[in-house]
Image (cartoon, grey):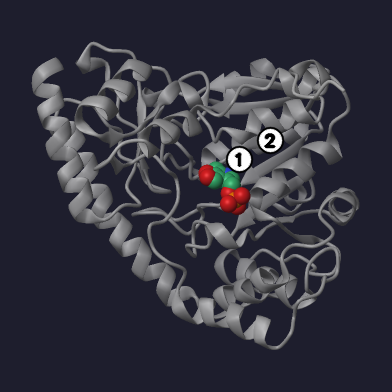
Amino acid sequence: MAEIGNTKYLSHRVAGLKPSGIRKFFDIAATMKDVISLGIGEPDFTTPKPVLEAGIRSLQRGETHYTSNSGKLELRQAIADNLFRLYGVKYDPVTEIIATVGVSEALYLTMTAILDPGDEVIIPTPCFVSYQAEVLLAGGVPVEIPARMEDDFQVDPARIAAAITPRTKAIFVGYPSNPTGAVATRETLLEIAKLAEQNDLVLISDEIYDRLVYDFQHVCVPTLSESIKRRTILLGGLSKDYAMTGWRIGYAAGPADLIKGLVRIHQYTIMSAPTTAQDAAIEALTNGEPFVQEMVTEYDRRRRLLVDGLNRLGLKTFQPRGAFYAFPNIRASGMDDETFAEKLLKEEHVAVVPGNAFGPGGEGFVRACYATEYSKIEEALHRMEKFMQRYG
Ligand SMILES: Cc1ncc(COP(=O)(O)O)c(C=O)c1O
């Protein structure tokens, strides 16, 4: 019998998806020794010890079963309390919050819940690689709006307004931004939210990096107004703020009717987020604040080192105010971003990600993540200096 090892069996939707441009570089880097990776977008810190211990205690208590589909009520309460403490925004933990397997799952649930075939979602780019893919998987059409370095990588609301059509269903925002480190001001967000209101659109806000901001007060989109909150799905998670990428806990918060839709998909595809991780997340949200502060202070030190260093090398870098990425313009090297990243990896063993992996507007830039030890960033800059002496 013939083996099913043939892409002809894949749906058009899946066969047409581009592989992530980030993974390709890790595969090359994994075959090399001595690589300093500024490529991967995750904290180098291990999860804070009390959080680890809460996970261990959960297992020792024998908490090895499913939880409620939406997640343990205690976790949803901790998420609601945290959002209220930080931003003064109120969500009902029973009907307005679902715990998910990372923001990744929350993105999937959101798109699948709101999109009919052909519905358009406006997505400012460069952006996290999953946004467009999740829209496509749900049968929708991503409408990409590039932001520019001259605008501090904040999307121009006028360009969003011009992209709205009768098929537009939602506007996506994601600040602090992966890959640029840009944040959005209250004024910009208000203008975008107004467009959502005027055109009766859903507003989706991925705020996974909300706590990782430097000299900036994060603006939580549902706090803009009660009426904006009523059309916003807020996505957040533990991966970045609490160094918990491997635990896989995120959440969506929003109007009960919309969250009900997300829960319905989640109950058939996931059942419930991992129980051990839910218990660890409760500890993180309840007692994790000092650890967040400690990590932010260290990221900030690394941010200054990397951004100053890149600018000194002639790689013009916008001052990131959030997340843990620098997004240098590499045109001074005379190369495009793919060639730059490939040569830098092969010749100097420093891994960065070509900007075009993050969509239109990313060409000519690379993403360098500073969630890496200070001394490694120093060494990476030293290697990049040699590289730029050859090509700059
Ligand atoms: C902007 C953004 N959103 C969502 C995610 C997904 O995170 P997770 O699924 O670990 O919560 C990431 C991960 O890199 C991200 O950068």
Question: Can see residue 221?
Answer: no
What crowding class fits label 2: few (fewer than 14 Cα within 10 Å), some (14-19), or many (20 or more)? some
User: Looking at the image, is 391 positioned above or below residue 109?
Assistant: above
Q: Where is residue 81 in the image (x, y as percent from the top left)?
A: 66, 74
Horizontal side of 130 relative to 47 (left or right) equals right
Q: Is mark 2 on a helix, strand or loop?
A: helix
Residue placed farthest to the top in the image? Answer: 334
Label 1 amino acid?
Answer: Leu
Q: Which residue is drawn at 45% across and 78% down?
A: 49
Q: Marks 1 and 2: CB-CB under 8 Å?
A: yes
Q: Disc 1 marks which residue?
A: 190
Q: In which quarter of the image is residue 362?
A: top left
Q: Which is nearer the eye, 321 or 208?
A: 208
User: Looking at the image, is 334 positioned above or below residue 260?
Assistant: above
Q: What element carries label 1?
A: helix
Q: Disc 2 marks which residue?
A: 194
Horizontal side of 34 relative to 113 (left or right) equals left
The C terminus sits in image quarter: top left
Residue placed farthest to the bottom in the image? Answer: 61
Q: Position of residue 96 (x, y in %)?
A: 81, 61
